[in-house]
Image (spheres, grey):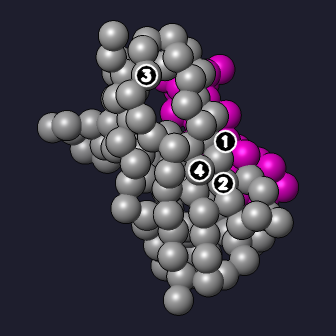
Amino acid sequence: HVQVVESGGGLVQPGGSLKLSCAVSGIQFRENIMVWYRQAPGKEREFVADSAPGDHATYLESVKGRFTVSRNEFKNTVYLQMNNLKPEDTAVYYCKLSFADGRAFWGQGTQVTISS
């Protein structure tokens, strides 16, 4: 069966970096869009970035220039490189595997905390 597992979260100081990973098993995601979301305490889940086949990517405006999404289809993994992190980036980050027919599989999330 399909599984989506995020990893790489942690506690970093403002200005620091983290690289999140999202590993997919049970399917090859070559034709799928992989999406990163985040949810901060007391706020709704929001779109952060997505990665489409052909290395097409889109970003939340507030993370443009700081975050980079990439995919390794041999490892069946998508990454979110986060640089120059700010306290407002603190959230649980989720990865979603999307299908054209509307199906989606979510990971359990990984906590990212930016604090001095």
Residue at disc 2, secondary structure = strand
Spot occupied by residue 79 in the image (x, y as percentages of width and height): 64, 47
Q: Which residues are magenta?
A: 49-70
* CB atoms of marks 4 and 2 within 8 Å: yes
| Amino acid carrying mark 4 in the image | Ser
* CB atoms of marks 2 and 1 within 8 Å: yes
Q: Nearer the viewer, mark 3 or mark 1?
A: 3
| Amino acid carrying mark 3 in the image | Val
| Amino acid carrying mark 2 in the image | Val
Query: Whole-Å distance between the Cαs marked 2 and 1?
Result: 7 Å
**Is residue 95 left or right of 34 when viewed as pictured?**
left
Spot occupied by residue 110 in the image (x, y as percentages of width and height): 40, 48
User: In the displayed structure, would residue 109 be above or below residue 58?
Assistant: below
Q: Nearer the viewer, mark 3 or mark 2?
A: 3
Query: Whole-Å distance between the Cαs marked 1 and 4?
Result: 10 Å
Residue at disc 1, secondary structure = strand
Spot occupied by residue 90 in the image (x, y as percentages of width and height): 34, 29
Residue at disc 3, secondary structure = strand
Name the residue that disc number 2 marks. Answer: 78
